Amino acid sequence: MSDPQRRPEGGREPRQVTWIWLVYLFLFNLAIPWYWPAGFRGPLVAGLPTWVAVTIAAVVLLAIWTGFVIHYFWDDDFDPRFVDDRPDEGGAL
Amino acid sequence: METVGPSLGLGGILFVAAYLLSTIFIGWLARKRRQNDSLADFYLAGRSMGVAVLFLTLYATQYSGNTMFGYAGRAYQIGFGWMVSALFMFSIIVGYLLFAPRLVVLARVKAFITPGDFISYRFGSKALTLLATLLMIYALANYILAQLKAMGAAVEGITSGAVPSAYGIVALAIIMVIYETLGGMRSVAWTDVMQGVVLLIGFAILLFVIPGLGGGLTAVVEEVSRIAPEKVIAPSAEACTTWISYLILIGCGAAIYPQAIQRLYSSRSVTAIKRSFTFMAFMPLTTSLIAVLCGITGIVVLPELVAAETDQVLPRLCALVMNESLLGYWLIVVVFAAALAALMSTADSALLSISSMITRDIYQAHFRPGADEAELTWVGKVCSWIAVAILIVVAIGTEKTLVRLLELKFEVLVQIAPCFFLGLYWRYLSAPTVVTGILVGIGLALGLTLFGQTRVFGFHAGVVGLAANVAVCAVGSSYCWFTARRASSAAGAPETDAAVFLTR
């Protein structure tokens, strides 16, 4: 963890940050072509139907967003919360 | 599939043979690098994988022969609607983000070898661990079967039938199990590096040469718009529901592939995993998307294919490229080496994973708890040979198609997802609840499939089963929470975290 002030609790992971998933929701909504009118193809963009080009652009954005999320919201360092003093057999709850 | 490839001729066959022999050489090199006879060294390469190896082994494992042949065939059948494949392959990475950060740390601290190790640790239930292990072995066996059948078809194709499919299956499977036995995960991962690079080059070549057969991408799409307009228009509302279903089915199912989880265990550091995932997020664009474009080109260039023949669209397009020029010939030789790489890299990883689960989660857990590491490693190698022998017999003896096998695999595998996605975060999720959820989910998924209801309102039967599975987990966890809270109130003490772990 390079900046302890910015990440005081350590062991941060993407699942804990709600707005990350709201962005994913938006981008997946963009990638799934539900909003086009029935029978829509549109003019060709780089040789592809418009809706296909938009879907590909959304996948690119999703990949970039994922890179950002992994870099900034998944801590590399060891998280002591996972250490418990119980035996390795675990135990049913 | 009757055939997968055009005849390569002597030069091409020698090239492919050299490639196959090099995998054994890599296996031998990996054996020389082994550090001890431990399970961690054999099945997890001593937990030493850096970014390059981890990324390429994840890539080569995740993208199978089905990506190359099946996806092109599916795009040929339904057109651009199969763009969903690029999205669902991406969704696997999102699936990892939902549980991998916590799992990889825990795996390192507790020295997990198999996915079953985590389940055993988290739930403390031998019954649940055995159930999950058997389901994972079943799913992986199906996966290997599909790869073996495609390998046989590929060999038969490139030799113009001179080598029958059955011989091809036996020969390639034996090569695979030899290098795997030599070096375990280390040799599988190193061959994956070569296979991953060949696969990337193969797809780049396909993008370069295939659309050109139809006069370029623009001409191809205009022609498809004229002869089959339904294949270029945006999907219907119900089809979009199926897109969502695919995202859930593949995003949750493929993320918990045992061989993929073991690669996370094998990483040198969390940084290596993070960087590998970042690269993997872009791979659908270099792989699935290209397979779709090849299938679309096939609609124009090979309009006569029907039914099962559609899986041959890519090989047939390659045959056309081969006949055009000497350069085209050698480019396609590389593409077919890539196809074999895709098939073998997926099958060897799944085989190693099966071997580890039988050894660790069944043999050691139930029969020989006191066995030392050397004995377990030896048992694992024997298991690999026995498993591959059984799978060869089944692969040669069955007639099921590639796609059907894959469908059955995901319907089952995805039911284990709550163990990881919820088990790492829901503190009151108990073993009996998870077992009940898995049985309900599988019962529903297979019951619907059995009665011909493979989709319900556009959602796959497996996803419907998963929804019921998660509902059972939610109800069971709520009940456990309520019971624990009532007990702590009756005792007059606030609830503590002493009896729980993981989920904070």
Image: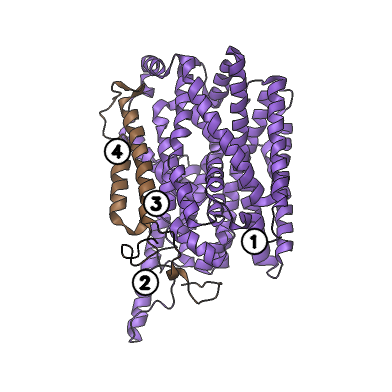
Chain colours: A brown, B purple
Chain of the residue displaying label 1: B
Q: Residue B394's mark?
A: none
- Where is A68 relative to B129, above or below? above
In 3D space, how far apart are the residues under numbered discs 4 and 3 (Cα atoms)? 21 Å
Mark 2 vs mark 1: in front: 1
User: In the picture provided, is B180 more to the left or to the right than A23?
Assistant: right
The answer to whether marks 4 and 1 mark residues whose Cβ atoms lie closer than 8 Å is no
Furthest-bottom residue in this view: B492
Q: Position of residue B20 (x, y in %)?
A: 70, 35
User: From this viewpoint, is residue B155 visible?
Assistant: yes
In the picture of the structure, the residue carrying the numbered disc 1 is: B360
Residue behind mark 3: A70
Mark-to-mark CA distance, 4 and 1: 44 Å
What is the CA distance from the residue labelled 1 to the residue labelled 3? 32 Å
Please say if the residues under marks 4 and 3 sit with CB atoms less than 8 Å apart: no
Q: Give the number of marks.
A: 4
Tell me if label 1 and label 3 are in contact, CB under 8 Å: no
What amino acid is labelled 4 in the image?
Leu
Which residue: 40% across, 35% down? B84
Residue found at x 53% / y 63%: B108
- Amino acid type at circle 1 is Arg
- SS state under label 2: helix
User: Numbered disc 2: what chain?
Assistant: B
Name the residue that disc number 4 marks. Answer: A30
Task: Give the mark nearer the N terminus: 4 vs 3.
Answer: 4
Q: Nearer the viewer, mark 1 or mark 3?
A: 3
> Dot 3: few (<14), some (14–19), or many (≥20) neighbours within 10 Å?
many
Label 2 and label 4: CA atoms lie apart by 38 Å
Residue contact at pointers 2 and 4, CB within 8 angstroms: no
Residue in view at x 36 percent, y 24 percent: A48
In the rendered image, residues at marks 4 and 3 fall on the same chain:
yes
B459 over B184 or under it: above or below: above
